């Protein structure tokens, strides 16, 4: 056990929040607290939320004493919120301080609307104040490349949390102009950046440490997207900093957990959220160490409590303790979505995370798009994979060559090519980072069926 890694500050915060006795938090005390809060949340939702009152009425009087008591409760699905968001409110609309509308990419589904009271937002600010203490100290500056133009938006909540620990948070918003963004980093001497993964990669690859902006950067916290390890490594080597992954979603109250300095997955705000990992097909819980779908229950949310909400994200609890020594659970890095792969003609499934891991290690690569189409000359028996790369201007030719090598080494692609089910078209490259070109989300498009599917990141 390494003793040079400090215990995650989230532990002492959770310990204090739940008023548990003893010098250190124990797992037993935390589970006891969580079960009591799940019970309160369930009773409250069944009494006040029109959705739960109607759909879950047979669970009125249900007693929750142990984690296994949750297993026969149904799940709350994203569609339930899409269908009737107001049905989840347990307070009057006058008490709602912020409404977030979430559009689901690539589908025609109605947007999800998530509601927060002032108290709910305070929980998030308090979390940021404690979680960020692991990365920055009083007197330092953090540049926040997250949306922050509206009151109570994520950028502003992070800034407010930082202010409480004496750290200046500068809300810059998502990057639209890389030169301007780098100028801001250089001028403010930021010790830490918070941003969207592909955007931070773009800055790191177009403005390396030698070009000054990155000189003070000790850590970069990536959020709002799944983070391929190859991308984190590319940012670390460009700026000579550490990259940490933050996992959260609006439904969780923006924030969920952040990677530990022990580099062993995330520790969660377990006083506010109860997490489970389930088999997405059967809905049964899986053992620690086995991957499944992340499901959470809110424990302290006032305006819109969610019970057993299915995130669609794939991850697993590590069965091993964290090197930092905390009793908090370790959620290993998110492995992508439980759905979203493209079925190939030989029955295997190619996923965006597989392409991510292979491609973001390519030097000079900034972003990419991938597309599957049918091969009309081959009676539709073969699929064609076309990949377009966006690179820095000096890396176009080598990136195309290296990317092709990398993609041809993806197991799923090797098998499909061996089975004669897939061919790989020549990779194309674009090196003109005009305007926001490099800032778009990457896509994986299926052009084979009449009903086109697009997976965006
Ligand atoms: Zn840890």
Image (cartoon, rainbow, N blue to C red):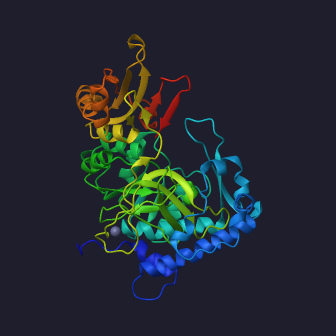
| Numbered label tally | 0
Q: Residue at x 73, y 56 (%)?
A: 87
- Residue 374 makes an appearance in the image: yes
In percent of width and height, residue 179 lies at 39, 40
- State ligand 1's quadrant: bottom left
* Left or right placement of residue 211 versus residue 85 in this view: left
Q: Give the quarter of the image for residue 402.
A: top left
User: Image quarter for residue 41?
Assistant: bottom right
Is 242 left, or right, of 176 in this rendering? left
Task: Look at the picture and state if 315 lies above or below 120.
Answer: above
Q: Residue furthest top?
A: 377
Q: Is residue 61 left or right of residue 200?
A: right
Where, quadrant-wise, is the N terminus in this rendering? bottom left
The answer to whether any part of residue 226 appears in the image is no
Residue 248 % position (x, y): 49, 57
Which image quadrant for residue 376? top left
Q: Nearer the viewer, residue 335 or 417?
A: 417
Residue closest to the eye, 5 or 221? 5
**Which residue is located at x 55 percent, y 35 percent?**
106
Residue 128 percent across, percent down from the top left? 48, 66
Q: Residue 139 versus residue 7: which sits nearer the camera? A: 7
């Amino acid at each position: 056990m390494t003793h040079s890694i400090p215990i995650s500050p989230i532990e002492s915060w959770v310990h204090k929040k739940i008023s548990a006795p003893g010098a250190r938090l124990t797992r037993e005390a935390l589970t006891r607290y969580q079960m009591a809060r799940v019970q309160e949340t369930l009773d409250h939702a069944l009494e006040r939320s029109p959705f739960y009152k109607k759909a879950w009425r047979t669970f009125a009087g249900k007693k929750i004493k142990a984690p296994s008591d949750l297993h026969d409760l149904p799940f709350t699905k994203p569609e339930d919120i899409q269908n009737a968001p107001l049905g989840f409110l347990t307070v009057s609309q006058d008490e709602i301080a912020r409404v977030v509308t979430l559009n689901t990419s690539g589908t025609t589904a109605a947007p999800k609307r998530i509601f927060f009271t002032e108290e709910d937002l305070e929980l998030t600010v308090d979390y940021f104040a404690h979680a960020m203490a692991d990365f920055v100290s009083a007197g330092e500056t953090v540049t926040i490349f997250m949306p922050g133009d509206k009151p109570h938006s994520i950028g502003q909540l992070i800034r407010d949390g930082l202010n409480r620990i004496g750290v200046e948070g500068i809300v810059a918003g998502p990057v639209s102009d890389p030169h301007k963004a780098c100028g801001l980093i250089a001028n403010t001497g930021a010790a830490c950046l918070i941003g969207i993964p592909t955007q931070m990669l773009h800055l790191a690859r177009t403005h390396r440490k030698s070009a000054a902006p990155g000189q003070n950067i000790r850590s970069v916290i990536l959020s709002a997207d799944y983070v391929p390890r190859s991308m984190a490594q590319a940012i670390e080597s460009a700026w000579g900093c550490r990259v940490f992954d933050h996992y959260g979603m609006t439904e969780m109250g923006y924030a969920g957990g952040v990677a530990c300095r022990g580099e062993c997955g995330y520790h969660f705000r377990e006083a506010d959220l109860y997490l489970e990992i389930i088999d997405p097909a059967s809905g049964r819980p899986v053992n620690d160490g086995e991957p499944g779908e992340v499901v959470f229950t809110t424990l302290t949310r006032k305006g819109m409590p969610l019970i057993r909400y299915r995130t669609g994200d794939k991850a697993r609890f590590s069965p091993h303790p964290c090197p930092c020594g905390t009793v908090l659970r370790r959620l290993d890095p998110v492995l992508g979505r439980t759905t979203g792969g493209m079925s190939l003609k030989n029955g295997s499934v190619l996923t965006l995370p597989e392409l991510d891991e292979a491609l973001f290690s390519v030097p000079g690569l900034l972003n990419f798009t991938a597309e599957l189409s049918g091969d009309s000359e081959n009676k539709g028996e073969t699929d064609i994979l076309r990949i377009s790369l966006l690179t820095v201007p000096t890396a176009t030719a080598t990136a195309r060559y290296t990317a092709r090598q990398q993609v041809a080494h993806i197991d799923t692609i090797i098998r499909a090519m061996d089975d004669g089910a897939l061919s790989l078209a020549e990779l194309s490259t674009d090196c003109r980072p005009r305007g926001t070109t490099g800032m778009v989300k990457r896509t994986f498009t299926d052009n084979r069926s009449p009903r086109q599917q697009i997976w965006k990141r």
